[in-house]
Amino acid sequence: MLNEIYARHGMTFTDDDLKSHFGRFEWYNPRSANVQSDLTELEKQNIEFLNNHQPTTM
């Protein structure tokens, strides 16, 4: 969910799994390694929420 926010703004991923996953979508157009300035305030809030509520791994 978190990476989809970034992908919708054209973030280029270094992780091969993420590249492969988002590369299957017609809407994904990788353009930049840093899309922070393109995010809306709501998206920034959603990212913060998701980062603070990640499940812990055992």
Image (spheres, grey):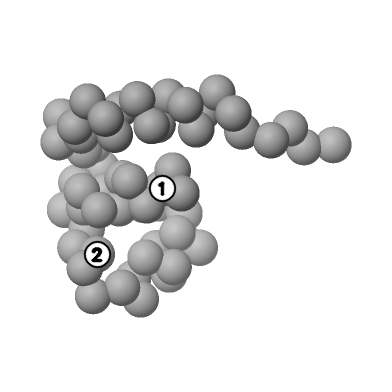
Where is residue 22 drawn, in percent x and y? Answer: 37, 65
| Residue count near mark 1 (Cα–Cα under 10 Å), binned few <14, some 14–19, many ≥20 | few
View extreme (front): residue: 42
View extreme (right): residue: 58
* Whether residue 54 can be seen here: yes
Between residue 9 and residue 42, name the one nearer to us.
Answer: 42
Residue tagged 2: 28
Question: Up-down: is 50 above or below 27?
Answer: above
Please tell me how many numbered marks the rendered image carries: 2
Where is residue 24 drawn, in percent x and y? Answer: 35, 76
Left or right relative to 27: residue 52: right
Q: Amino acid at mark 1?
A: Asn
Name the residue located 47 percent from the left edge and 54 percent from the top edge: 15
Reading the chain from its start, which is encountered first: label 2 or label 1?
Answer: 1
Quadrant of residue 33 in the image?
top left
Name the residue located 44 percent from the left edge and 68 percent from the top edge: 21
Quadrant of residue 27 in the image?
bottom left
Question: Up-down: is 56 above or below 1?
Answer: above
Name the residue located 44 percent from the left edge and 43 percent from the top edge: 2
Q: Amino acid at mark 2?
A: Tyr
The residues tagged by marks 2 and 1 sit, at their Cα atoms, a distance apart of 12 Å
| Residue count near mark 2 (Cα–Cα under 10 Å), binned few <14, some 14–19, many ≥20 | some
* Whether residue 36 can be seen here: no
Name the residue located 59 percent from the left edge and 28 percent from the top edge: 53
Between residue 9 and residue 15, name the one nearer to us.
Answer: 9
Residue tagged 1: 3
